[in-house]
Image (spheres, helix red, strand yellow):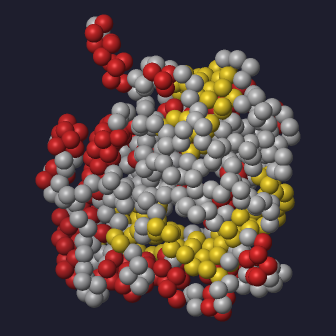
Amino acid sequence: MTAFLAALFLILFSLPAEAQTPQYGLALHGTPRYPASFTHFDYVNPDAPKGGDLHLSALGTFDTLNPFTLKGVPADGLGDVFETLMTRSLDEPFSKYGWVAESATIAPDRASISYELRPEARFHDGSPITPEDVIFSFETLRDKGHPAYRSYYKDVVKAEKTGPHGVRFVFRDGKNTELPMIIGELPVLSKRSWEGRDFAATTLDKIMGSGPYVIESMTPGRTITYARVKDWWAANLPVNKGRYNFDRIIYDYYRDTTVATEAFFAGRYDYRYENVAKNWALNYNTPAVKQGLIKQQIIKNELPSGMQAFVLNARRPLFQDRRVREALGYAFDFEWSNKNLAYGAYSRTSSYFENSELAAKGLPSPQEIKLLEPYRGKIPDDVFTKEFTLPKTDGSGDNRANLRQAADLLREAGWVLKNGVLTDAQGKPFTFEIIESQALFERWVQPFLRNLERLGIKATLRVVDTSQYQNRMNDFDFDVTVGVFGQSLSPGNEQYDYWGSSKANLKGSRNLIGVNDPVVDGLIEKLVHAHSREDLVEACRALDRVLLWQYYVIPHWYIGTYRIAYWDKFGQPDIAPKYGLAVTDSWWIDAAKAAKIGTAQNRK
């Protein structure tokens, strides 16, 4: 590289000079929203009173208190026990502010990031948080934690101590623009507390943390209670002022959604996020709601909805033909189901980055074409020339036109209908199983199964318990399941875990589909290495198109709002964050309202 090119490289791809000195906060693109002098986030009440209990619900069960490994089902709420080097705000796309770390310094070549830890940072036993703890946390999560950590940290060469409170992470190179932000999300664990213990095993022993809450008590698989740390070292940091206001947070576990809904109206817990449209439309006509004891609230959000869908396991020979995958989509009559099962509440998902500017719409832009052109001949030609659309119906239940399209595709793929049974060239029938952990999807699945039956396909639904479901997902032991691929406003390294070839057969990865495609890998690289917001958006759209035109999933639906219900005993900040709900860490008990509720809630 000539001296001129080297200089040009630094001009184009280095952070501004001021970002090469210790920074209180970082933004993936641009600068953080809050200045160095900020005292609290805008979406909290810095004077919120502390006290009272928050009762919440969880579904299924739990069998471990270690949320960082593949084994077991961790208890809900464990995130509040631990702290990270930096923390995000919920009113910015992707910014981080110092938490355990007082400051962060990105090297001019972006090939490392250094942190200066706060000298006052303490674990719950009063011991200081040291660089050795940070290094232990990184190495342990990378080597023994959930496979996702290996994916996140694959470009981190090492972590090293640089001083009494200093630690540096050295990267393979400076190309991964998101990596400095990802390292800021590192949970900090106590090295001393793990001596002589097997990190990879499930455990019901309490794990040392440094966060706003500690585990107070639990009944395995049934309930867990967290108590606020009264002398928490970080309570008055700007990132925490006005947050974590409840003295205790209690999660009670219920076997299914129906039982949990009944328990809410009986006053057994305080707050409910309603994700079933039928429940929202019909179930809230109760005395407590009519009397104003329970409030319903719809909050608009600006979060990408991601993709919820029937996920086809492409590792199965049955689903390896793209025409077969496309055909199955014609059997899902969303319009009829939305009208009859959800009272028209939903919109159809048509992007892996739905409800955001990252979604591919219309024909590809010139910038997208430039990204996609090297793969011409390796991806469907339709990617370049057609807008991706999903099959539609008039909602009447007459799906014959779509089923004819499906039958044509299946014939092209070599499937033949004999005596009402769809068979391959060897006479083997087309059969598969849909596996789920919640019975609530059954009413959506059954019409789909009936349409498949009209095609000669025998498909069944099986609902299993939470532990069995998780184990089967970890082992990719399924034909079809309902999967959710959540997205942020700044997608990055998690895309490797979703669709990367290296994760297709790595147990526990989130590549449920089994995508194993060099084209997808190449587009993920473009996305991760984007050096501007514009480049990121174009790369996301190009990736979106390729995934959509491969028909790996049968998309479901989304709604751009939160539907919540709660017993009217809380105070809320005047401003709601754009990019998340902050109930457990920004609401508080309003004493006057709580007194009015009185004994209406029965928690015996």
- Quadrant where the image shows the C terminus: bottom right
Q: Position of residue 78 (x, y in %)?
A: 71, 53
Residue at position x 20%, y 58% from top? 362
Say if residue 198 shows up in the picture. yes
Say if residue 427 shows up in the picture. no
- Quadrant where the image shows the N terminus: top left
Residue at position x 19%, y 77% from top? 404
Question: Is 235 or 396 nearer to us in this picture?
Answer: 235
Q: Position of residue 146 (x, y in %)?
A: 60, 44
Q: Position of residue 502 (x, y in %)?
A: 44, 39
Please give left or right for residue 224 compared with residue 90 in the image.
right
Q: Is residue 130 above or below residue 70?
A: above
Please give left or right for residue 200 compared with residue 478 in the image.
right
Residue at position x 48%, y 48% from top? 92
Q: Is residue 5 above or below residue 199?
A: above
Q: Position of residue 227 (x, y in %)?
A: 81, 57
Q: Is residue 191 above or below residue 266?
A: above
Residue at position x 28%, y 44% from top? 538
Q: Residue furthest top?
A: 3
Q: Quadrant of residue 326?
A: bottom left
Question: Is 376 or 588 nearer to us in this picture?
Answer: 588
